[in-house]
């Protein structure tokens, strides 16, 4: 028979299996304009705080227009997104950890081993102009409109292309192992309508894929599989739009 204590211990073990902690951590706390808060971090005289039970330590750097803002504190595990989010307007890098005063580590060093991918979508369909970015097509422009860099912690960087019914799409993204059975598998479908390329190096999907024509090509034969594949790509593109807003 399970006692309340044993059930609590089991729940705690499950929580610790992730990034969380069942104990109250001591974390460094500081923010701009504290000159000791940046990288390299100076722990001498730094303030620490005891965080709520279950919280993790975190550090964040915001860079924009030559200005860098640093902060170190604690947060709930669900609020932690390790890695960098880069847009033409600026970059936010952060990491989380679950040991006392672990957030004194250099932010640049902590995010260096996290895979990052380009995220964007291009479509030759004029009705998709609200999600399409010509910078996403080949030749690829990493600094173009609606092109962002995001962490990919569970999968590979990839490029998905479709060419069906006179319309073409190209999406650069992270192909997750948890949402794509078998992970990223390079190649094309039986109808040669949807193709996928994969890579595992930082921002490597900027150089993958074959450029899609900017004007519709001749319509290929209609296939049920092709319709499903094209619909899937457009759904991915719609998801990218939400992330870019």
Image (cartoon, rainbow, N blue to C red):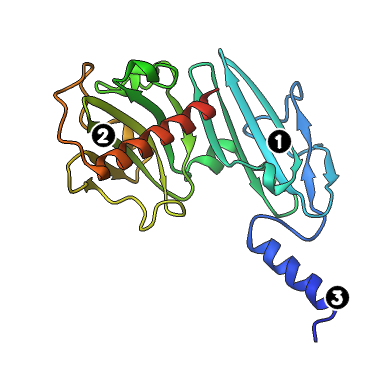
Q: Depth-wise, is mark 3 or mark 2 nearer the camera?
A: 2
Judged left or right of residue 57, residue 232 is left
In the image as oriented, which residue stretches furthest toward the top? 65
Residue 197 location in percent, x, y?
26, 42
Is residue 80 visible in the rendered image? The answer is yes
> What residue does disc 1 label?
42
Q: Quadrant of residue 5?
A: bottom right
Residue 137 location in percent, x, y?
29, 23
Question: Which quadrant does the N terminus fall into?
Answer: bottom right
Label located before the other in sequence (2 or 1): 1
Residue placed most toward the observer, 147 or 243: 243
Tell me if mark 3 has few (under 14), some (14-19) or many (20+) residues whose alpha carbon lies within 10 angstroms of its own. few
* Residue at left offset 51%, top offset 25%: 244
Residue placed most toward the observer, 158 or 96: 158
The Cα–Cα distance between marks 2 and 1, rounded to whole angstroms, is 51 Å
Question: Which quadrant does the C terminus fall into?
Answer: top right
> What residue does disc 3 label?
4
> What residue does disc 2 label?
162
């Amino acid at each position: 028979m399970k006692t309340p204590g044993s059930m609590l211990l089991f729940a705690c073990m499950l929580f610790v299996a992730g990034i969380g902690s069942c104990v109250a951590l001591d974390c460094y706390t500081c923010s701009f304009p504290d000159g000791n808060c940046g990288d390299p971090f100076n722990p001498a005289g730094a303030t620490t705080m005891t965080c709520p039970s279950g919280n993790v330590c975190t550090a964040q750097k915001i860079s924009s227009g030559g200005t860098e803002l640093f902060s170190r504190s604690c947060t709930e595990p669900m609020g932690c997104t390790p890695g960098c989010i880069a847009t033409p307007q600026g970059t936010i890098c952060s990491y989380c950890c679950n040991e006392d005063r672990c957030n004194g580590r250099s932010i640049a060093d902590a995010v260096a081993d996290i895979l990052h991918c380009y995220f964007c979508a291009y479509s030759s369909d004029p009705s998709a102009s609200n999600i399409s970015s010509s910078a996403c097509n080949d030749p690829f422009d990493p600094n173009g409109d609606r092109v962002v860099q995001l962490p990919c912690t569970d999968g590979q960087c990839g490029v998905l292309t479709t060419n069906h019914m006179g319309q073409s799409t190209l999406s650069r993204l992270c192909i997750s192992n948890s949402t794509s059975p078998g992970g990223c598998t390079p190649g094309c479908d039986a109808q040669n309508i949807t193709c996928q390329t994969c890579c595992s190096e930082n921002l490597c999907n900027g150089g993958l894929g074959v450029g899609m024509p900017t004007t519709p090509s001749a319509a290929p034969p209609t296939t049920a599989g092709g319709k499903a594949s094209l619909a899937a790509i457009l759904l991915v593109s719609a998801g990218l739009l939400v992330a870019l807003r």
